[in-house]
Image: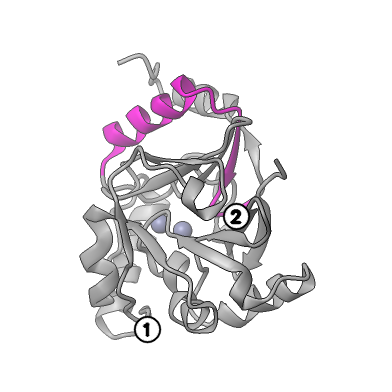
Amino acid sequence: MAAPDGLRAGTSNVYLLRAAGGGCVLVDAGLPASGGAVLRGLARRGLTPGDVRLIVLTHVHFDHVGGLAAIRRATGAPVMVHAAEADRLAGGQTVMPPGTAVYGQVVSRMGRVAVRVGLIRFDAVRPDVIVTGGESLAAYGLEAAIVHTPGHTAGSITILLPDGAAVNGDLAVNQFPFGLGPIFPPFAEDVPALYRSWRRLLDAGVTRLYPGHGAPFPASRLREVAFRNNHSLIH
Ligand SMILES: [Zn+2]
Ligand SMILES: [Zn+2]
């Protein structure tokens, strides 16, 4: 199976997963106005919009669903999202999660203002497939499973591939705008849940993470970062 193919969509990653029998599955849809860049990325790989069989959303934040309305219009592909964030997507609700440290707290506060005045927004999209975790993507030509990995948001999901690769959204990141430190996300709704989700991925045999921001990295980094943060990932 080919490794997840990252398309840059602003500072966010959109991943392209090749499906058996042709076509592909997209994970996430990038920042607002990045729909065109994603479609051009498809074309560069010899794919047409009609080749997209599914769009999976790791979570509903504007930097992951901003390009969705345009991509969905062009591809007609069904949109898959976790049940906890389906209403947020359908309602076009932009939320800023709390910061996990000073940087995130400051940005989160500024972000809330930007949301209030409409500077940060995305076009609402009605989801087609609602998941809760445990689903297979076999129907879309992909040997992959959806795992519910809350923490960054309540409805965050990770796409698990059989070779140990995982496309994990913002559950862990490897870069953030303004050069902030890697791996531990600057924003999270529920930090203890986030650590439990890290452990769930390690227990599931994940070896390599493909984050929503930055380059792929080995899953062992999760254990290192948790240890550095005085968290053993055992409980
Ligand atoms: Zn996010
Ligand atoms: Zn993000």
Provide the residue designation for mark 2.
179
Q: Is residue 230 left or right of residue 71?
A: left
Residue 28 seen by the camera: yes
Residues tagged 2 and 1 counted as in contact (Cβ below 8 A) = no
Q: What residue type is disc 2 on?
A: Gly
Residue 39: percent from the left, percent from the top?
64, 77
Q: Secondary structure at mark 2?
A: helix
Magenta span of residues? 190-214
| Distance (Cα) linking label 2 and label 1 | 22 Å
State the residue at coordinates (62%, 52%): 214
- Marks 2 and 1, the one that precedes in the sequence: 1
State the residue at coordinates (46%, 74%): 68
Q: Is residue 88 above or below residue 199?
A: below
State the residue at coordinates (45%, 20%): 203
- Quarter the N terminus occupies: top right
Q: Is residue 151 left or right of residue 56?
A: left
Residue 95: percent from the left, percent from the top?
27, 66
Q: Is residue 125 above or below residue 96?
A: below
Residue 94 seen by the camera: no
